[in-house]
């Protein structure tokens, strides 16, 4: 049975996210990735609807990976996704997209919830997913 993984990231990192997705699937064909790309402001009129749709995807996963780039820490959506994932019982893993702590600042929720944070090493990430 496939392991379902929710990916939390910012739109600016989409090309790196797609590369991550392909590399991880190549290492482990039992992984299924889900996300909900959000282009709406966190406090928009559609925010409640969007949160409901994201929560459905988070509930359908057992692991949430936060893909951390240069701007990820500024996203209120990412913070909400990580905290919601934790409250839903998902295992949390952070992955630095540039393997550079100076460049890839951790989102507050990743730090607060003491999620494991890894550099971009697909073998280590697949192992951490379990």
Image (cartoon, helix red, strand yellow):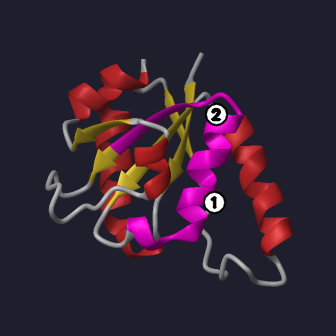
Q: Are marks 2 and 1 in contact (CB under 8 Å)?
A: no
- Residue at the outermost front position: 112
Q: Is residue 106 left or right of residue 124?
A: right
For the record, the magenta segment spans: 72-94
Q: Quadrant of the C terminus?
A: top left
Which residue is painted at 31% across and 34% down in the image?
26
Foreground pick, 77 / 126: 77
Q: Secondary structure at mark 2?
A: loop
Q: Is residue 28 left or right of residue 32?
A: left
Alpha-carbon neighbours of circle 2 within 10 Å: few (<14), some, or many (≥20)?
A: many
Question: CA–CA distance between discs 2 and 1?
Answer: 13 Å
Q: Is residue 102 above or below residue 35?
A: below
Which residue is painted at 69% across and 36% down in the image?
87
Q: Quadrant of residue 17?
A: bottom left
Q: Is residue 129 above or below residue 21?
A: above
Which residue is painted at 38% across and 53% down in the image?
67
In this figure, which residue is indicated by the disc labeled 1?
36
Which residue is painted at 30% across and 31% down in the image?
125
Magenta region, mostly helix, strand or loop? helix
Alpha-carbon neighbours of circle 1 within 10 Å: few (<14), some, or many (≥20)?
A: some
Q: Which mark is residue 61?
A: 2
Q: Quadrant of residue 1?
A: top right
Residue 84 at x, y = what percent?
A: 67, 46
Q: Is residue 53 left or right of residue 75?
A: right
Closer to the chain start, of discs 2 and 1, is 1
Q: Is residue 29 above or below residue 93?
A: above
């Amino acid at each position: 049975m496939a392991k379902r993984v929710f990916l939390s990231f910012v739109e600016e990192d989409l090309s790196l996210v797609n590369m991550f997705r392909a590399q991880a699937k190549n290492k482990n064909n039992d992984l299924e990735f889900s996300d909900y790309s959000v282009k709406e402001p966190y406090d928009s009129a559609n925010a409640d609807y969007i949160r409901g749709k994201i929560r459905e995807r988070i509930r359908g996963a057992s692991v949430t990976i936060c893909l951390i780039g240069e701007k990820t820490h500024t996203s209120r959506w990412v913070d909400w996704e990580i905290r919601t994932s934790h409250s839903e019982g998902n295992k949390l893993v952070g992955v630095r997209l540039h393997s550079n702590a100076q460049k890839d600042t951790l989102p507050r929720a990743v730090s607060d919830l003491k999620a494991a944070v890894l550099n971009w090493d697909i073998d280590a990430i697949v192992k951490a997913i379990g």
